[in-house]
Image (tube, grey):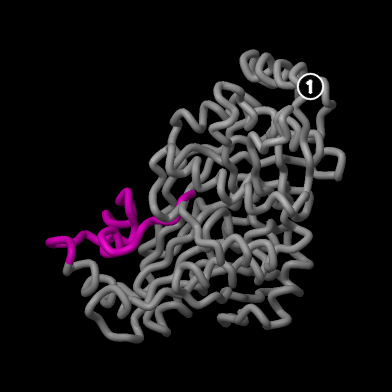
Amino acid sequence: MTTTFIRTDDSRWRTALERLTHDIYHLPEYVSLCARYEHAEPLAFYAELNGSVCLIPLLLKPLGAVLDVDSTWCDMTSPYGYACPLYSHPHDPDEVLAFLSALRDEASKVNVCSIFLRSHPLLPAQYTQLPQLTAWVHAGETIVVNLLVSEEEMWSNTRKGHKQDIQLLRKLNVSVVMDEWNLYDEFVRIYRETMGRVHAKSYYIFSDDYFSDIRASLSDNLHLCCVLLPDGHVGAAGLFTIANGICQYHLSGASLDCGKLSATKYMLHHMSLWARQRGCSVLHLGGGVGAQHDSLFKFKEGFSRDARPFGTCRMVPNESLYGIVAGGTTHRLDIVESLNFSFFPPYRKEVVVAAPI
């Protein structure tokens, strides 16, 4: 097996993506974007075995920046979103095991204490066999709208209350515009207003630079949807991504100008039709906050009852280093038990805000 860590400008990254079913989160531009705002180094684990390929996007995070440890010690984690490991044969447990074992070995050589990998609800892999000190942990579910069915069936799968609100907005002559980037600043304002209203964690309050960078980085893969009220004001707006026929609901907000009108429902209904017309097979709405079955999850469930499992893969490549670091925060740490903690790795819980799922 050939194994290495590669940088975003390595030609093997794009060559692998041409062979592997992937999403927006696997693009080197996206990984670089996340790295800039998580104080990390963007890279990927790349491996070849008997004609098969593995690509795992990663953020390398030095531990010395947050803990009093050797400057060479570090962690690896998936970028924000669903940047799951990619395999030529994701449903072959032996191949998945071989590649994950290789990742563990290579990471140990460069003083990686822990690895945290997120799954992708639409790109599942077989994790029935795992290397030592590795665990697969179910986190929750996310909602998927099937765009391959007829528009009539999509509408029939929409909850009655959602239908009524969408029909009401139609009667009020609400309209939708796509990729009117002159409204981008208004979207940012509404997004921040919404995050403040729902008391979102600080991680969700992105800077002006982030909004500029995500547009520049994702370019034609990024789309802005704005719902215009009859008076011309933006009632709701959202950022969506498209890659390989997968439309992802990224960020959105609703204006206080809407009152009780659910412009977000209208926006998501429009996006399902718009993405379908452009050849997408699914609109992935994501789940609740932290993948919980909360009010946000129930809202999204109003567009589809197709709930897909989401999970994380936790790995300890270097047992001795992990024990030293984690032992300072947990008395008599049981490493195997810690793989299933609600927060992994446990020593980062107090010093780093968890990325939203």
In the image: residue 341, left or right of residue 143 = left
Above or below, comparing residue 243 to residue 164 in the picture: below
Question: Residue 331 placed where, x, y %?
Answer: 12, 61
Q: Residue at x 82, y 20 (%)?
A: 152
The crowding category of the residue bearing disc 1, from other C-alpha atoms within 10 Å (few below 14, some 14 to 19, many at least 20), is few
Query: Outermost residue toward the left?
Result: 331
Q: Residue at x 67, y 38 (%)?
A: 234
| Residue type for callout 1 | Glu
Question: Residue 254 placed where, x, y %?
Answer: 58, 36
- Disc 1: which residue: 153
Q: Residue at x 73, y 17 (%)?
A: 167
Q: Quadrant of residue 24?
A: bottom right
Q: Which residues are magenta?
A: 329-357
Could one spot residue 304 in this view of the protein?
Answer: no
Q: Is residue 346 magenta?
A: yes
Above or below, comparing residue 321 to residue 307 in the picture: below
